Image (cartoon, rainbow, N blue to C red):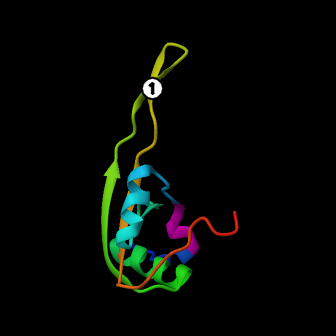
């Protein structure tokens, strides 16, 4: 069977920005955190951030956070895994995440 290759849209790769205390401290160093699709690669994330926010991306690091175990009505389940991307921008580049909210 032939492998079907699908192109990810830039707006589909980035699910949401992660606004935490740690990410706010890192944003001063031009480093931003995003939750991305589990199937997205570093190259996909770099291209998506560059085109959506019109910035130059220096590097991308990714990690997968495993879902926590939870109980509901006596049954144990797990939350979904999440993929997080740490995006470092070139010097002088800024992303305005909270503007217009």
The answer to whether 79 is drawn above or below residue 53 in the figure is: above
| Residue 95 appears in the figure | yes
Query: Residue 40's quadrant in the figure?
Result: bottom left
In the rendered view, would you say 67 is above or below 25? above
User: Horizontal and vertical percent for residue 55?
Assistant: 47, 85
> Residue drawn 48% across and 18% down?
75
Q: Residue furthest right?
A: 100
Image location of residue 9, percent across then percent down:
55, 76
* Residue located 50% across and 55% down the image: 19
Closer to us: 81 or 52 = 52
Task: Answer yes or no: is residue 40 visible.
Answer: no
Q: Which residues are magenta?
A: 11-16
Examine the structure image and report whether residue 23 is included in the region drawn in magenta: no
Q: Is residue 15 magenta?
A: yes
Residue 29 falls in image quadrant: bottom left
**Residue located beneath label 1 in the image:** 70
Q: Residue furthest top?
A: 74
Which quadrant: the C terminus?
bottom right
């Amino acid at each position: 069977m032939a492998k079907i290759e699908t192109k990810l849209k830039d707006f589909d790769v980035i699910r949401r920005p992660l606004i935490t205390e740690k990410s706010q401290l890192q944003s001063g160093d031009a480093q931003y955190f995003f939750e991305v699709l589990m199937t997205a690669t570093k190259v996909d994330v770099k291209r998506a951030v560059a085109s959506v926010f019109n910035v130059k991306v220096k590097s991308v690091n990714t990690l997968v956070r495993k879902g926590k175990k939870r109980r509901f009505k006596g049954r144990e389940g797990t939350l979904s895994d999440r993929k997080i991307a740490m995006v470092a921008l070139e010097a002088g580049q800024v992303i305005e995440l909270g503007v217009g909210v």
